[in-house]
Image (cartoon, helix red, strand yellow):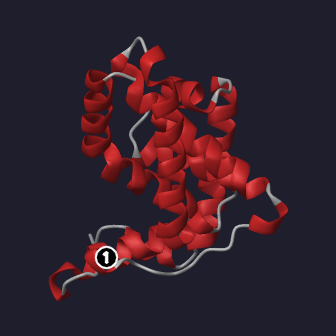
Amino acid sequence: MDQRDEQEFAEYFEARLDAVRRTAFLLCGDWHRADDLAQTAFVALHRRWRKVRDRAALDAYVRRTVVRAMIDESRRPWRRERFVDQVPESAQPDADVGNSVATRSALVAGLRQVPPRQRAVLVLRFLEGLDVTATAEALKCSEGTVKSQTARGLVALRAALGDSLDDLRPAS
């Protein structure tokens, strides 16, 4: 890569690292694995940087790489979805954030209990804000698969949240 390409990649990396880490954390529930998944995605992107024609599609490429890496890792026998309940020091809540932290913690805990593929669909659809078509493209599957995985994932999330679901609803 020439110096201009390196500079462009460095700028993209700097701008998108935090967002990619957050997405990876929502997918796997562990900040250390999230760092690994983000690193995997950016290394793959760096290898192909000169071949990328559509710079507007970089986010989709990185997102797809993170999701695929998470699903691939979850299939490995030594990596059977072991989550570490930890929050990095930089994300330690202040006393003023009370309800939003409880809501976020309940949601992340619930997502941890949803199977990896369904979790990926839920994160992309509802937390990343992708529509069915964009989610299908990111996961390289059909729109019907996205819809069925969304339905199953929501059922699994509701079951995982149980009584916590009432805490997530706004008070009336």
Left or right position of 32 against 101: right
Q: Residue furthest front?
A: 2
Please name the amino acid that badge 1 sits on: Val
Left or right for 156, reference 21: right
What residue lies at 69% left-to-right and 32% top-to-bottom?
Answer: 145
In front here: 29 or 38?
38
Which residue sits at x=48%, y=15%? 51
Residue 104 visible in the shown view: yes
Of residues 161 and 2, the one nearer the viewer is: 2
Residue occupying the far bottom of the picture: 95
Residue at the (62%, 70%) spot, across then down: 160
Spot the residue most to the right.
77
Quadrant housing residue 136: top right
Residue 38 sits above or below residue 77 on the image: above
Q: Helix, strand, or loop for circle 1?
A: helix
Q: Quadrant of residue 82?
A: bottom right
For this rendering, which residue is in front, 102 or 83? 83
Residue matched to label 1: 101
Which quadrant holds the N terminus?
Answer: top left
User: In what quadrant of the picture does the C terminus appear?
Assistant: bottom left
The residue at the point 47 percent across, 59 percent down is 35
In percent of width and height, residue 150 lies at 61, 43
Q: Give the number of marks.
A: 1
Determine crowd level at label 1: few under 14, some 14-19, many 20+ residues with C-alpha closer than 10 A.
Answer: some
Q: Position of residue 28 (x, y in %)?
A: 57, 61
User: In the orientation shown, which residue stands out farthest toward the top?
Assistant: 53
Q: Is residue 131 visible?
A: no
The location of residue 148, given as percent across then percent down, is: 69, 38
Q: Position of residue 72 (x, y in %)?
A: 72, 48
Q: Is residue 93 above or below residue 114?
A: below
